[in-house]
Structures are given as structure tokens and as C-alpha cells.
Amino acid sequence: MWNSIGQHYDLTQTQKQVFQEAAEFHLRSGGAVPIHGPGAAKASFAVANDMPEDEFAALFKSQRHELHLVATYAHERMMQIGFNDEPATTPKLTSRELEVMTWSSRGKTAWEIAEILGLSEETIRDHIKHACRKLNTSNKTHAIAVALLHGLIVP
């Protein structure tokens, strides 16, 4: 969240100026979603508007899961468009991995998915780990984005 950066870091005059100029263009509130992977790739997805900071903070907090998913999906898509010369082949996941990834895309935790499917939490984590490996992703959110991109799951 932009409004908390000054509380955690000493901003330079130039950095303060960026925030002041953003406010002049009605970008008073904002936040960034960090993206890690694949490999050493790193990116950031920013959202901003002119809402009062407290309203924006509540909205950003309540929608952070969806923002992270959108950011990761957009990053993955841009990586595919920009860096792949050959069309990607569709990865193959087992029906159980697809089921677990679908529940994960809906925001369910490993514990909740285990309860829904009648499996252990460790088994759910194993399915997620295997899906990540097959999809060549660095984490669960990245795997969800790739699975969505390939049309393997529908949240």
C-alpha cells in the first residue's frame, strides 16, 4: 500500500515528489502486487485511484487474492507472448490435481480442500506441488494462473 511506504522506509525527496505528482493526477491511493517467477523473473502489478486512503486500503485488502491472481495471470501471459517463439504445449495434470487446483483458484486453503475432498492436508499439498512442477511454476498462485491460461481449470 502506498500510504504505508513512508512508515517503513525513509523516502528520498525524489521519491516523495513521485507520490506528490501522482496525487496531482488524482492517483491518491494505490498499491502494488509483487510477482516472483518463473526463475529469476520479478515484476510488479500496480493499482491506483482517487479514493480516500482508508476506503482504498479496505478494498485492496478484501480483494488481494483476486488482485494477486490477476497480476500473476497477466504476467504469465505477457511472458508467453513476449518470450516464446513456439506455441506452448498444454501441460497434463491428473484429474485430482485439476480438482485441487480448481478449489485453490477459488481461494480455498489446503486444509479446506482436504476437508472437501476427504483427503489429508499433506496429500493436497503434494497435489499442488506436483501441479507446480508439471506447469513449471514457482508457487500455487503462479500454477493457478498457468492452468487458467491453458484452459485447464475454471474458477
Image: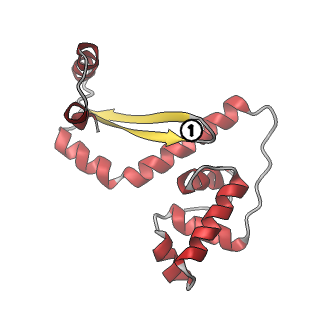
Q: Position of residue 49 (x, y in %)?
A: 29, 33
Instruction: Kindly identify which residue carries mark 1.
Output: 75
Image coordinates for residue 117, horizontal then vertical, percent = 56, 82
SS state under label 1: helix
Q: Position of residue 46 (x, y in %)?
A: 40, 34
Count of numbered tags: 1
Q: Quadrant of the C terminus?
A: bottom right
Is residue 123 depicted above or below 89 in this figure? below
Coloration mode:
secondary structure
Residue type marked 1:
His
Residue sitting at x 46%, y 34%: 44
Question: Looking at the picture, how far across and down is residue 35, in whole percent?
Answer: 50, 41
**Relative side of 74 to 84, left or right:** left
Quarter of the image where one finds residue 32: top left
Kindly give the residue lying farthest to the bottom in the view shown. Answer: 118
In the displayed structure, 146 sits above or below 107; it is above
Residue drawn at (27%, 34%) of the image: 2
Residue 118 relative to residue 60: left or right: right
**Residue at the image point whose x is 55% and y is 86% from the top:** 118
Quadrant of the frame with the N terminus = top left
Q: Residue at x 23, y 23 (%)?
A: 23
Q: Could you say which is closer to the camera, residue 7 or residue 29?
A: 7
- Please rate how many residues cluster around mark 1, counting C-alpha atoms within 10 Å: few if below 14, some from 14 to 19, many from 20: many
- Closer to the camera in the image, 21 or 121: 121
